Image (cartoon, grey):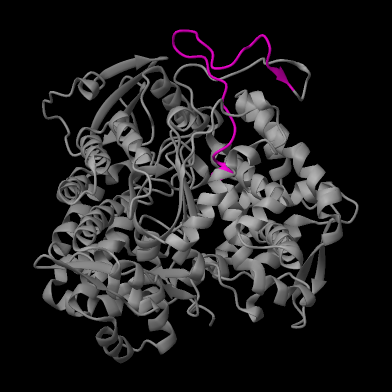
Amino acid sequence: MGEPEAGSEFAIGAAAAGPMADAQYILPNDIGVSSLDCREAFRLLSPTERLYAHHLSRASWYGGLAVLLQTSPEAPYIYALLSRIFRAQDPDELRQHALAEGLTEEEYQAFLVYAAGVYSNMGNYKSFGDTKFVPNLPKEKLERVILGSKAAQQHLEEVRGLWQTCAELMFSLESRLRHLGLGKEGITTYFSGNCTIEDAKLAQNFLDSQNLSAYNTRLFKEVRQDGKPHYEVRLASVLSTEPTLDSEMASKLKSYEYQGSHFWVTRGDYAPILQKVVEHLEKAKTYAANSHQEQMLAQYIESFTQGSIEAHKRGSRFWIQDKGPIVESYIGFIESYRDPFGSRGEFEGFVAIVNKAMSAKFEWLVTSAEQLLKELPWPPAFEKDKFLTPDFTSLDVLTFAGSGIPAGINIPNYDDLRQTEGFKNVSLGNVLAVAYATQREKLTFLEENDKDLYIRWKGPSFDVQVGLHELLGHGSGKLFVQDEKGAFNFDPETVINPETGEQIQSWYRSGETWDSKFSTIASSYEECRAESVGLYLCLNPQVLEIFGFEGADAEDVVYVNWLNMVRAGLLALEFYTPEASSWRQAHMQARFVILRVLLEAGEGLVTVTPTTGSDGRPDARVRLDRSKIRSVGKPALERFLQRLQVLKSTGDVAGGRALYEGYAAVTDAPPECFLSLRDTVLLRKEARKLIVQPNTHLEGSEVQLLEYEASATGLIRSFSERFPEDGPELEEILIQLATADARFWKGPSEAPSGQA
């Protein structure tokens, strides 16, 4: 990458951020871009299934726009600006204008990559790592492109107004704006800019006291003339203040006094966006394959209309009961990774089509699950009373709207449903096929003699790991609960804590959940438990046989799975922020913790050694002694997994934090010197790929699949054609919603006082 021009705002910000700023806060021009291939899966759908998939996709894409409002104050304006520019002018046509304005090819490509990144992440912060990214070209040059574009020629004042609103924040790398976070640690729009971690804790306690979920909420704080903080808890819904027959929510929408503070529960967040979601869910209902799907969609409609998480839970019950559908989907405020407090769900919606061949392997794994659960290293009392046999399918994704696309999913996330009703697991086959492929020359931190083996077996070993992680990782373990009537779901007289040899001393009370109790560490701790289960159970020959591996191949799959995990533990350092001593990505923190556990096992099982690369720059090597995986690695994981599960089951937050945060600490203590190694990891990091998704388009009564090339331009075109009927209206909606709340972040660089 070329040096930023002296005097440009980017150059100043990058210089202030230190020597790694350019790599950390931009997307490189040569970033990998892949297209999701679901053509064959779509071709096999019946006309009715295509219509069902189409309307669910439309609902997902509309809802995904809410993520812009859940990310940063400027994200909706940036999206609206880019949307206007590329709707009026194709990227190739705009290129001619940009070059005439004095941009180099590299600078124009940097703009396209930035735009593709905003679309791909639904905002200007990376979905994986929560780091801000800025355009890698001078601000003045980008301004010339924007103000000379066809969109500006048609509507100069509007385009100029959008640019003036977001330009400074688009480029700013002021320390608090570099990462998502709460209080002094970063920026978030789940909370108003003056909220601290103490406000988040108080709000969580309030929500628990009212038996309200945080999943579909945001928190806005104002200090009024009386000097007391006033908190607005705003639920996402189509309805706002309208009278309603729905007593379930109506009784909650009022003012409360709680611990000396004033709380006001309102609704109507993202209302015009959710209205469009609801319209397409209504249309999808017409093409549902069975009554489970019809009732599921009816409850989702109720949830998004009224702001009710209880209705979404009811919909999720019907979804769990809808076994083996041809078209699979889920939609709502789901994952809490990006809420700095770990309780609020980001909107996501996916639509996917079953891959029958791979699903057959997962079905075999499901039938073996009860036997395999007995292999896990905790007493039977710490396992669910009954294993609720889930659906486990391999899917080809048609649509995944939100901030990013995972490799596998285990949902719903509601603890009470998971314990009593069950869950579903999905592995996203066409995502795995493109997102995690690695070129040999870009393979860092491995010995030369490991690289060919790694490339050959990484895909197959990851299939095994994802299967075990989702089904038997997230699907295992029991939470000890005392309900509102005082009844226990375990016998407090006879259940013994295997760590202490004594009776259970703690558990979950009515209204408490895993997320609300373990808050900031909940997501990463649970990912660590699931990853550890995958590593532990992949040693089982029965598991390897299910996936078709025996003999030397099976041993290679085990070795590469473990090697991939310890390498990922080193790569994880990219997602650690030393200034705040905090992790920005739940899965990567989990993998670093596992690396620490395996290093602690000693006996040469794992070593991480700083070296100098062939290019003369700092490098490192990760080594795993495959002969010691079973003799040293397995016992170490066994001890660690039991501790993780016991602390989770008993709701022992203090013990859980001490264990997990201890392993997650990044220091420069020898021999690994991880803080110093972090600079090496940043120096050699590879940007996460961008994924281009297709569109579905209704022509008469037929649904067409529109595919795009694997490039930044292709990704931009996919979004330019995503909302053909109402693109301008959506831009106005986003601008209006962002502007209505802008006062909550005015002067976003001013960190709130108080503890953060």
Examine the residues drawn in magenta and state their main secondary structure.
Answer: loop
Q: Is residue 157 left or right of residue 45?
A: left
Please check the rendered image and state whether residue 682 is part of the magenta-colored stretch, yes or no: no
Q: Picture quarter containing residue 78?
A: bottom left
Q: Residue 415: where, in percent of width, then height? A: 47, 31
Q: Position of residue 33 (x, y in %)?
A: 45, 75
- Which of 78/397 is in front? 397
Residue 458 vs residue 167, the one in the foreground: 458
Magenta region: which residues?
A: 471-497
Q: Nearer the viewer, residue 535 or 443?
A: 535
| Viewer-closest of 25 and 244 | 244
Q: Position of residue 272 (x, y in %)?
A: 17, 47
Q: Can see residue 5?
A: yes
Which image quadrant: the N terminus? bottom right
Residue at x 49% of width, y 56% of height: 360
**Left or right: 739, with 461 as reference point:** left
Q: Is residue 578 visible?
A: no
Say above or below: 3 vs 343: below
Tag count:
0
Q: Give the answer, above or below, for where 523 lies relative to 613.
A: above
Where is residue 270 shown, x and y percent of the image? Answer: 24, 44
Q: Quadrant of residue 34?
A: bottom left
Q: Is residue 486 magenta?
A: yes
- Is residue 145 depicted above or below 656 in this figure? below
What residue is drawn where x is 66% and y is 32%? 645
Q: Residue at x 13, y 61 (%)?
A: 726
| Residue beneath the point at 24% across and 29% down | 266
**80 with respect to 169 (left or right):** left
